[in-house]
Amino acid sequence: MDKKKIERESGLDFVRFLAVFSVIGAHYVLNCGYYRTDLKERGMVVFTVGRWFFMTCVPIFMILTGYLKINKKLSRSHYMELIPIMVGYGFIGTLNIFVSNYIYGGVYTWKSGGDELFTYRIAWYGGMYLCMMLLIPFFNILWKNLGKKQKQLLILFLLCITAVPSLIPWFFPSYWERLYPLTYYYIGAYIRDYSLKPARWKSAGIMFLVLLVETGGTYLTKMEGVFNWEFLGSIDNGYGSLPVCISAICLFLLFYRQFIPGKWVRRLLASVSQVSFYIYLFSSMIDSVIYWKMQDKWTNTSQFLTFFFVIVPLSFSLSYVCAVLFKHLFSPLLEPKKWFSISK
């Protein structure tokens, strides 16, 4: 494998690592009491910046999907890739229900647990990704029949109807905001097609400025002293909002072609990358155990930052170990080629 190939793959693996780590970071912000705490409290500015940084997790995964799958065609092999996704979701989601019942005491009945699982409320991203996988070959047919200028206009118009309304609600209607996964998908496809690589200082600088604007907006729009969920978050907590979109693009461009030194580091990142979806699924269950044990430990906001450097790495590590074990134990069910003979 040549160095250029290694650079590309190790950079993408690092981006995916950042995304899945940010998922767990976002869970921490939710569970530590940030949203119930007065923003004037000590350390809350730092946590607010962190909150908006972690919000790039889902957009980065979607950009990665567009980057990696824009050449997929309407074929059986593409749809067979849904097997490990659905097997993982079904097993880990069911296990999550039983763990929640054990910890919190009868949270789910058989009916409510089934509803939670089959409506994807147990892990909404799984349901979103399933539907995206069904449509990807058709998205790609459209994309391949467009010229560069047309692709730019498509992304611009998608941004106008999915990202701008959260920031400027009086200009574009909000009817189409939930199409934001498609916006990110085509952004990833465009980066792949034209190998965008702006100067890293530009990407870092823009992302830093956007984080400052988001933090300032949070304080300007706070409600009764606490975080206002309506600020950029009317749809899916703001994953599709323009500032979050800009931050996610900058973060992706900053690292996706970065060469990661150290063979063992690249191997670890590749390992995390291969089980990132399972890490996401297990993290919810691991978090429920950790935060159940920690529920009486939060005494003041100054502990938020202290516990972050313990709980988030711990949750990530345990979720990673569980994901690797799951992949190893269930490998026959997770490899479509062992189910059917797929012609290339």
Image (cartoon, rainbow, N blue to C red):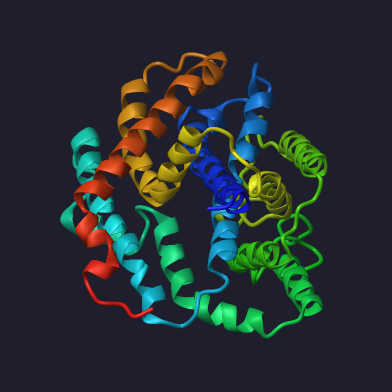
Q: Is residue 1 visible?
A: yes
Q: Is residue 150 above or below residue 317?
A: below
Q: Is residue 243 above or below residue 213?
A: below
Residue at 77%, 35% (x, y): give it.
212
Residue 1 in the image: x percent, y percent?
Answer: 52, 53
Q: Quadrant of residue 49?
A: top right
Q: Does 70 sit left or right of 75 as displayed? A: right
Residue 43 in the image: x percent, y percent?
Answer: 64, 19
Give the number of callouts: 0
Quadrant of image for the C terminus:
bottom left
Q: Quadrant of residue 185?
A: bottom right
Q: Is residue 231 above or below residue 51?
A: below
Residue 133 in the image: x percent, y percent?
Answer: 45, 71
In this view, the residue in front, 54 or 174, is 54
Q: Does 220 sit left or right of 241 as displayed? A: right
Residue at 73%, 55% (x, y): give it.
242
In this view, the residue in front, 170 or 50, is 50
Residue 35 in the image: x percent, y percent?
Answer: 55, 33
Residue at 81%, 39% (x, y): give it.
201
In this view, the residue in front, 248 or 180, is 248
Q: Does 337 sit left or right of 300 as displayed? A: left
Q: Is residue 226 visible?
A: no
Q: Is residue 239 above or below residue 302?
A: below
Residue at 37%, 23% (x, y): give it.
295
In this view, the residue in front, 279 or 328, is 328
